[in-house]
Image (tube, rainbow, N blue to C red):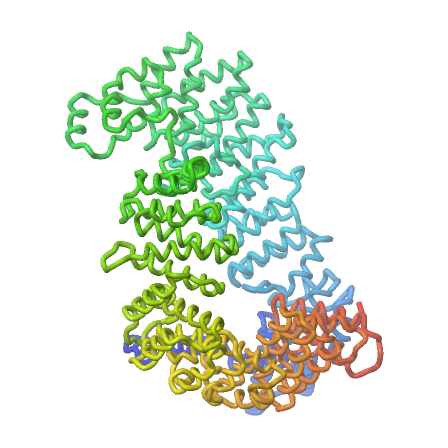
Amino acid sequence: MADAWRRQGGVGAGDLDVLVGAVEELRAEQAERGGFRTRQIGRLVAEQTRQEMGLAETEAARSWSAFYSSASGVLHGSSSGADEARRQFDDVTAAMGQLFLGLPERADRLRELARLEVPVQQDADEVARMTDPRAGVYFLSAAVSGRWLGLLPLPRLLPEEQRWPAAPYLRRLLAEEPEGVCAWVEEHLDAIRAQGPGALAQAVAVVSGAGMAACSLLTEIVRAQPDRFVLRQAAYWAVDIPVAERTGPWVSVLESVLRVREFTTHESWVSGLLLRSLVGTAHPGGRLRTGEDRLGVIIRSALAGVLADHLGDEDARFQAEIVNDLGEVALADPPHVVVVTLMRAVLDLALTEARLGVPVVQRLRGVHGKLPASEHRARLVAVHLAESWPIEGEHPDAAAGWWRAAIDAARGVGGGAWPSADLADFLALLDGCPRQVRASLETALAEGLGVPPAAEEMGAWADAFPGPVPRRWRIVRGLSPVLPEAVRAPWQPVLALLEEKYGPPAERPEPVVKMTDWVESYGGLSLEAFTARARDDGVVAAVAELAAASVPRDDDDEGGGDGARAWLLGELVSQDPDTWAADPAAVAASAARPALQTAYFNALHHAAGSDRLSHGLLGPLAEAAFAVRPQGAGVPEAAQLQLVISNLLHRLWDSGASLGAAEAAAVDWLCILITGWSTPRLDTSSPLGAATAAPGGSALLSLTAWGLQHAVRTGEGLPEQLTTVLEDLLGAEPDDQALAVIGFGLGQLHHCDPGWVTDHADVLLPLEAAWRPARSWLARGKPDPALLAQLDRVGLWQALCAPHAEGALDRVFLALLDEAEPLGPAGVFLAGLAGCTGGDQAVCVMLSRLATYTARAGSGEVAERAAVIWRAALDVRLPAAALRGVGHFAFADSLDQDAWLELTAATLTQQPDLEDADHIAERAARSPASPTAELIAAAALDHGPADGYRRTETIRHAAALFSRAPAEDCPEHEALRVALINAGAIEDAYGN
């Protein structure tokens, strides 16, 4: 049915998912005998403890189904003697105690059970009946006897997918009986696997504490269950084993982990850690393992075998091939591609063995034995020979073996898709070969490179040019600078043909995939070169040269390279804004084109915005920008230049400066831009953002800035040029973008000319639609308590309840902080807001943001006024949900501690569940002598997060407060003790 509804689209997908989940839960319940009773118990447990039952508690809850079945049987005539009735009564009574007695009432018995050194089965049965998750967690964290491992039922000890209450107990046992714990995990491995990969990963994490005693178990686990998170725990175990204790089986675990490509792909950092551990273990401290200590040989073979596995994957082979120089890869680098890090590990170990005097044939035995003959094997051997030559070239016997290996390696140089720099380095060494091996070496190289193409094949390729270069040709061309003449000569016709088409080859092969740096990012233009030109010949000459420069890489630049030029010009200007702003008219003239002028003026505009441009330069800069404004339609890049010019004018007028003689023309120009831009529209997703990104919208902002400055300077109110434009926009069909800009400046307009705003209140101040100017002002405008007071109160409340109303809420709490009370008494305002639909959440958010503002302000005066608002909220008895946000006042250090304690305690009587419970407990702990602080910490424990990091922090701070508080017989101290017990911190509550 759900599938049919989904196809018809009549029911929301989220609702269908909930329905399907409920159906699946019901099916599971029906499939399990007694499932309904178990669910009932689970609901009771969750209500009492705020925690879900785990595997052990669910098993304990199943006993209630058995009780119902037995009672039903007796009711319907089955025989039951006195002993059986007594046993059933005792079992039900014990189960009822576990279910209904609070944890504080059972704490003494829990501590007694945990301290038993020789528990018996009756004790284990009592633990098995625990349906309170907190009791089980505490017991297993405190139990001291190893006998529990054999007495408790398996569900009480098994890990679950996301938690394992028994982990602390098993970790304690590991210290005394590591083999016993490993044996227990191995015995129950199938049951652990059945709980999911997360459970198995937790088991691996625990047995890792057994050191090498866990090796055989981990070997079995990583081979049978190669899950990523399981393997990660096994990897951490391997790294933690001391080098002196590492053995062949240890290597086997690492080898199994590293063979799983899914793991090495997603856990590249851990994989690199394992590879470094293997290489460091082979011959630790530079000491060669000899005789019966064959761990170095085992590691050499394991690394080669893992590399062979990875190179069996096509993608891995490609990733290895596009690395141009394995010599530039370091094992200590973050491994972006694990197959390359593997190759580096093999090379590092081989080089270590070369330094230790291991013969080349022996140290390359793993590579030759594990890797099939291929271009990758040939490259590894060649790179190792190049890296080891400085060591072995000094010893005649070693050098002789090196040259024999080099001749064999030369036969493989023609493989692969591209030449590589490291292979070229190897070939360069061959130029110094002894005379007696030269002929053999050249024969091997010729064999590796293959037979040159016939003239017919070359002609056909030339006729079809441009086209792909054959693989062998490409490799010979890339390696040709270092090939012996006798080997290169047969290929000379091909090399000449390729040089004719592509020019001479690089002295050393370049990477197939090349990451460009900043020098090469500007379409190939050099930032350093133009920086030097500006320094030596002046910025005007530099920009003139840039405007005429050829852009090497402008394939993707629709402006014929101006995109790259503009990018580079912006970077040049940002280096020294004052120098570049000294003669803006000359620079703009040299830039010549709108794209470059835009980049120039925009870079200086941003420099001014970040206070990196001297104030006196802003006026001439704006004048120069206005002088090059695009004239007429159809000018390329005109819109962006108009936008930047308008932004500069806005910044100039905001600073209080004037454009001088050009100001009237600038105002007229802005009015033209606005008229051509505004159009009826009500569907813009972000009206203010869209407006400020358009020349017309920016022009309206700039014109407003000019009008505000004029009003301040003259004291005569807003100028006619501005009010005419504003009134035309307000009287036309609504344009949400233009009205958003007007609303953004509404606070300043009201400040400079309140009469004009009052005269147009009917179009400026309504709040019913999101496009109204007042709504834009509420969201983003400058705070103005007097203007806020003019808004319709009910409309204001409704606007504050709308989604994403944080800006409006900020303006309101700023007005409430005003001692003049422009919105009336704070309590009355908050009560009215809370009475609207969604108002309780709006008040909650407002109080939270008020608390944040108070904390950041760090002002005692602000804190005192905020406390007045907080107290007013309490006095009018707001809905409980509206008060959660005051928990954030825990961050407000400027608020007097006694006042905070008083207000927080008063709030808890109306709303015990406050936000930021962990920080509330932390602040309460500052006053260990205060009973009120203990009451607050108890509430934080009882109503704060039920699990997770914040729960842990809440317990920690509350326990610290309890330990330092006077041990008085007062209700607040007892409340905190009980709360600690209910939080599972039983030992803290008992002062241990």
Q: Position of residue 682 (x, y in %)?
A: 32, 77
State the residue at coordinates (39%, 40%): 542
Specify whether 380 is left or right of 132.
left
Q: As displayed, is residue 567 above or below residue 125?
A: above
Task: Point out the image quarter for the C terminus.
Answer: bottom right
Name which residue lies at 48% across and 71% down: 713
- In the image, 958 versus 671, the foreground residue is 671
The image quadrant of residue 147 is bottom right
Tell me which corner region of the image, top left, top right, bottom left or bottom right, holds residue 477: top left
Judge whether residue 135 can be spotted in this image: no
Query: Is residue 904 among the parts visible in the rendering?
Result: yes
* Position in image of residue 571 (x %, y %): 43, 46
Q: Is residue 936 left or right of residue 341?
A: right
For the point 54% across and 46% down, the residue is: 270
- In the picture shown, does residue 988 fall above or below 209? below
Residue 843 location (% of width, % of height): 55, 82
Q: Nearer the viewer, residue 36 or 972?
A: 972
Of residue 43 and residue 755, the one placed in the foreground of this image is 755
Q: Is residue 383 left or right of residue 891?
A: left
Residue 489 versus residue 72 in the image, above or below: above
Q: How many marks?
A: 0
Residue 641 rendering spot, x and y as whole percentages: 33, 56
